[in-house]
Amino acid sequence: MAQRRTPFGDRARYWFDSTLARGAAALVGWMALLSLAVVVPASAVMVWTDPDAPPSLAERLAEVWRLTGETLRLGGATGTPLRAMMSVLLALVTLLYVSTLVGLITTALTERITSLRRGRSTVLEQGHAVVLGWSEQVFTVVSELVAANVNQRGAAVVVLADRDKTVMEESLGTKVGSFGGTRLICRSGPTTDPAVLPLTSPATAGVVLVLPPDEPHADAEVVKTLLALRAALAGAEPRPPVVAAVRDDRYRLAACLAAGPDGVVLESDTVTARLIVQAARRPGISLVHRELLDFAGDEFYLISEPALTGRPFGEVLLSYSTTSVVGLMRGGTPLLNPPPTTPVAPDDLLVVITGDDDTARLDDCAESVEKAAVASRPPTPAPAERILLLGWNRRAPLVVDQLHRRARPGSAVDVVAEPGEATIREISEAEADSGNGENGRNGGNGLSLALHHGDITRPETLRRLDVHSYDSVIVLGRDPAPGQPPDDPDNRTLVTLLLLRQLEEATGRELPVVTELIDDRNRALAPIGPGADVIISGKLIGLLMSQISQNRHLAAVFEELFSAEGAGVRLRPATDYLLPGSTTSFATVVAAARRRGECAIGYRGHADASTRPHYGVRINPPKRERRRWTAEDEVVVIGTD
């Protein structure tokens, strides 16, 4: 078979590429030849077309050489060959010096720019917020810090994570949006290295927040970061307050020790599990927490009011028209929803919900209470409940424990999970652990657990279950696996929600679904009905961390608010407080709640329950505001079960 002849153009291109591959010398040679191939003919044309050109050939060639030398900066001196050679040599030395100098300057500038783009320069700020670590919570934390700094000039938020600086800036810019007057500064490097932490100037920071990364060993990483921070701040006085979060309560003590006496460490999984259970029993509670904890609406504050000293707490509840009083801070210990007869001591601070720390003004509203509208019947006791738990993850045992704590006799939980997700042993251990609650109060309430194996993303699995016979359906996503996309658990959860929604539409009956999602952006994609609730597992902790970072004294208030046995946020039927159909003021609701030993702080209107962005939730409404209360409305209170 005849060998195919390679075209000349391909062989020439191959030869040219081969010479370039030999290094810089070949590249310089080709550049010199190309330059001479253009400059020499052009110089010759200029000489031969010049009417004043010398007549002899030698003189014209010398003129061509002079023009070529001037163009290429090669001297261009004429005369003896030695003189011309020395002229070329001096020109080459000058060219080498200048090009080397330009190269050094260019390299130095490039390295400096690259260093800045990599985020390796030290931040020189005062009173800024430092965020250490990267997870889904970082977007909530940065967004809330920006909102908190809206009225402050020169505010800055510094984020340090072991990621590319440009990628961090683009991600935060996309998800957070406008930063207003707050400057965002990103730095790259491991948060566990004490030599890297000084890049953020933690000694001059106003607060340092440590986020748990999206990794299996996140809690150990948080503890190590706190130890590195302590080493980086050695000798610095005063030290900035530190707010951190861990997932597993087994790491909380170590994290507290590493954070120091002024540090605050939150336990994210337990708080999330409590909120899931609260939402399962009263959907919509997550919306209330979001309204309370973000900086867009009314927030918690601690204020001093000497004029109320000695008055019983029950009277204080109606002493403000646009502020809701929920408790007392006595000697650093919060007393949320104390008995109405508790007197206000001289050194007590009031725990209030208001628009700002200067909007709480005394304005007695007792005359706005209409006793005729107050319901007189006792609240209906909660019956036994049947709960369907779809899916299993690291928070599932905590959810079971929270269900067990307040379960009525005869209650049951059915767990549906794939064989690799939950085993009989895990279910038994969760049941045994929940049966040994605090003070032994949960030992005999009779909550039963049953495990059913099945894929909750398959229609046949859900069809086998009589889902409408359950009082609540809780959907839990898988734990993110190493190497998988972080939104993979949400993808499976959305499939399950879509199948549940199809069952709702097929039967025409609404399902009380509570689902857990990782990414807040997936809330808008969740195919759920108006009676469902969505818990964004990382968002609540991010909101809590942001609130505490602005006022660390609120840490004790939130600890009490989200504790298992303390006074917390509750949603109650409006008919427990008011006669259905009555038109009356919110002050009447506050007075009715006071009779039940609770603090009313808002409501959720049924007519607007499906309307964004607040879904009918109104926190801290004016007490003189009147509205018509229906049997489907709900009242937001601070109280106990």
Image (spheres, rainbow, N blue to C red):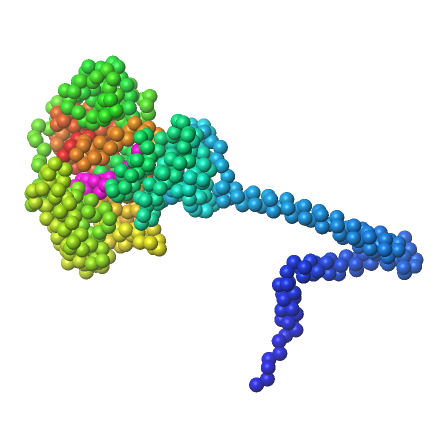
Check residue 276 for magenta coloring. yes
Kindly give the residue lying farthest to the bottom in the view shown: 1
Rendered location of residue 620, percent (x, y): 25, 28
Quadrant position of the C terminus in the picture: top left
Q: Residue at x 30, y 35 (%)?
A: 257
Rendered location of residue 18, percent (x, y): 63, 66
- Please tell me whether residue 304 is drawn above or below residue 197 in the rendered image: above
Q: Give the left or right position of residue 154, taking residue 435 as reference.
A: right
Rendered location of residue 103, percent (x, y): 65, 48
Depth check: 430 or 589 in front? 430
Q: Residue at x 10, y 38 (%)?
A: 441
Dominant SS in magenta? helix
Rendered location of residue 128, percent (x, y): 42, 31
Q: Looking at the image, can residue 532 be seen?
A: no
Q: Total of numbered circles in the picture?
A: 0
* Figure quadrant of residue 546: top left
Check residue 157 for magenta coloring. no
- Please tell me whether residue 613 is drawn above or below residue 311 in the rendered image: below
Q: Looking at the image, can residue 338 be seen?
A: yes
Quadrant position of the N terminus in the picture: bottom right
Q: Residue at x 19, y 16 (%)?
A: 311
- Please tell me whether residue 585 is drawn above or below residue 80 in the rendered image: above
Q: Residue at x 41, y 30 (%)?
A: 235
Q: Magenta residues, as a range? A: 264-282
* Figure quadrant of residue 452: bottom left
Q: Give the left or right position of residue 189, taking residue 272 as reference.
A: right
